[in-house]
Image: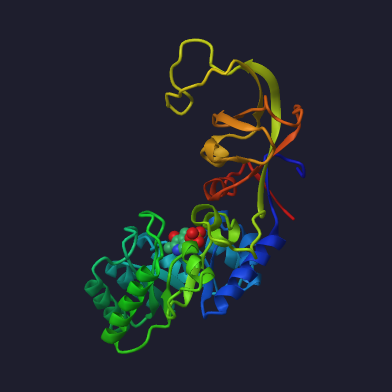
Amino acid sequence: MKDRYPRVEIDLVHLKHNVEAVVRKCGEIGIDIAGVIKGATGLPEVAKAFDEGGAKWIASSRLEQIRDAIDAGIRKPMMLIRIPMLTEVEDMIRLCDYSLESEVEVLKAADEEAGKQGKIHNVILMADMGDLREGFWDKDEMAQAALMVERDLKNLHLAGIGTNVGCYGSILPTVGKLNELVAVAEKIEAVIGRKLEIISGGATSSLMRVWDGTMPERINMLRCGEGILLARDLPLFYNCPQPELCQDMFRLKAEVIEVKDKPSHPVGDIGFDAFGHQVQYVDRGIRRRALLGIGKVDYGDPSELLPMEEGVEILGASSDHTIVDIEDAVKDWKVGDIMTFDVNYAILVYITSSRNVSIVFK
Ligand SMILES: *Cc1c(COP(=O)(O)O)cnc(C)c1O
């Protein structure tokens, strides 16, 4: 099945280059990188690129992906970065050396389980600094939880604290925000009477503070996925230059299965599309269009696809078909031709987890 489509082609050499570049840049200012593999559904080859490129931890939101990384022979410490479900604590303790935590009940369960398994599990307590996803909002409550881990939960080690920004609340990792995090760490250090090893200052968006040289000194870990896997968001959204990074690690390729001239407006009484939406169609007359053998089940939202061929425009999709306008295309598209797309994070998470999309490494 070598020439099966659709497929995603992955350039592991460029990926590893990006890992090395980010690890080196961050290393210069004392920051270690947790390589976050969830953006590519934890493909073991991708996890290996993070490993070989020098990430200090391999991190994922999903235990299945961490298990795959271990099974692939990776010996780096594993980190669960979605705060754990109570029902996965047992597996977490077995598979992970580190986890991000924000609930006392879960910490107690993790301590008990670690005791049963004869392990010491490292925890990083999460502070919510305003992005309003996970983490302690009340920092006194957080300090008390830290003290509980330090004093009472003998099978847990309080490795440090961290925060996440820019995922739900779109909060920026400003110097002010990160200094607030350092202040929370110092408050906790005062309560427990020792220094914390780790202050984890966020994800890809915090790389901006590395590139522009304004990262507060005590931040010493970033958990980085997108900024290595795709390296698209920072230059695209924040005009943040990162000259050393490649952006061509993932290419989606789909096969043309029909090429015809058809009206651009549907003909007949209009109801709902396959997903129950009422769609507005623009009448541009008869136009040449191609159908591709890939659909929403493979990538989610067709409007997120990024065609790389000139004059190709996405019109829409159903579960298994994608419709593209090729009236103004430079190339004379034929059935059997292969169309290439660049991908963003939203597309990448789908295509790497769809079993209809084959994965090809180069
Ligand atoms: C997904 C995630 C990351 C990595 O985010 P990127 O933007 O891909 O770098 C880091 N930390 C947590 C808690 C996450 O959920």
Seen in the picture, residue 281 relative to 42 is either above or below; the reply is above
Give the side of residue 72 with respect to residue 219, left or right: right
Q: Is residue 351 left or right of residue 180?
A: right
Q: 220 or 239, which is in the foreground? A: 239
- Is residue 37 among the parts visible in the rendering? no
| Whole-percent x, y for residue 289 in the image | 65, 24
Quarter the C terminus occupies: bottom right
> Horizontal and vertical percent for residue 166?
41, 58
Q: Is residue 319 above or below residue 101?
A: above
For residue 197, what is the image quadrant? bottom left
Q: Is residue 328 above or below residue 175?
A: above
Q: Quadrant of residue 194?
A: bottom left
Measuring 55% from the left and 45% from the top, which residue is drawn there?
347
Q: Residue at x 49, y 65 (%)?
A: 208
In this rendered view, identify the residue nearer to me: 348 or 73. Answer: 348
Q: Quadrant of residue 115?
A: bottom left
The outermost residue toward the top is: 268
Quadrant in which the N terminus is drawn: top right
**Can you give x and y, in whole percent of width and height, for residue 294 in the image?**
62, 35
Image coords of residue 314 (percent x, y):
59, 32
Work out whether 124 lies above or below 344. Answer: below
Whether residue 228 appears in this view of the structure is yes
Residue ID at (70%, 39%): 5
Please state the total of marks drawn on the protein image.
Answer: 0
Residue ranking furthest to the bottom: 193
